[in-house]
Amino acid sequence: MRRILNVLGEVVQTMKLGDKIIDNRPPEGYRSLQDVLKALNYDEALYNKIKNYITVYAWVDSNVVNPVPLNEHVANQYQQLTGVNFYRGSNRAYRAGSDTQGVDAEARSSTTAWTTSRTPAT
């Protein structure tokens, strides 16, 4: 985030904009754009240059962002915390394998899947 904001700063000719915004972020995070103005030491000219390019509101498109949990235990913890259910089909696949030991997400033997996908080109 800092790097993205620093690039925006270069575009509006304000070096280290990201450093200013991130380093002066309130402990509870930004709750309004006025908090960002405060972090910029009330530099209204700079604030007016960037206000149309920043937001303090988070939004996640659950149809696009659906990370693959490490294993079933982690998926259950995440579901309890967020209410997000990781539906992975009948053979639930995780980053550390599937819920069926030794079988990948396509029901192939993990050993076969590893060797066929990792075979070097000749």
Image (cartoon, rainbow, N blue to C red):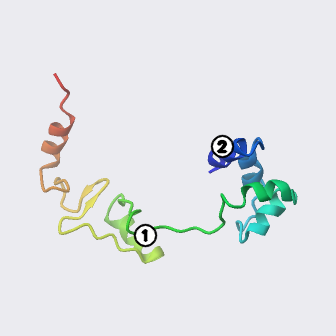
How many numbered callouts? 2
* Dot 2 amino acid type: Val
Q: Label 2: how many residues lie within 10 Å, few (<14), some (14-19) or many (20+)?
A: some
Q: Which picture quadrant has residue 113?
A: top left
96, above or below 60, in the image: above
Q: Which amino acid does label 1 sit on?
A: Tyr
Label 1 Cα neighbours within 10 Å, binned few <14 / some 14-19 / many ≥20: some
Q: Looking at the rendering, which quadrant does residue 16 occupy? A: top right
Residue under label 1, please give it. Answer: 78
- Where residue 86 appears, as percent x and y from the top left, is 33, 69
- Indicate the position of residue 63 as horizontal and vertical percent values: 37, 68
What number is the disc on residue 3? none
Q: Going by the picture, which residue comes out furthest to the right?
A: 42
From the viewer's side, name the closer residue of 33 and 95: 33
The residue at the point 43 percent across, 78 percent down is 83
Say if 66 sits above or below 45 in the image.
below
Q: Earlier in the sequence, mark 2 or mark 1?
A: 2
Answer with left or right where residue 39 lies relative to residue 50.
right
Pick whichever, 56 or 77, lies toward us: 56
Q: How far apart are marks 2 and 1 (CA)?
A: 33 Å
SS state under label 1: helix
Nearer the observer: mark 2 or 1; the answer is 2
Coordinates of residue 97 in the picture (x, y in percent): 25, 54
Left or right: 98 as drawn, with respect to 21: left
Res. 24 image quadrant:
bottom right
User: Where does label 2 land, which residue?
Assistant: 7
Residue drawn at x 28%, y 70% is: 87
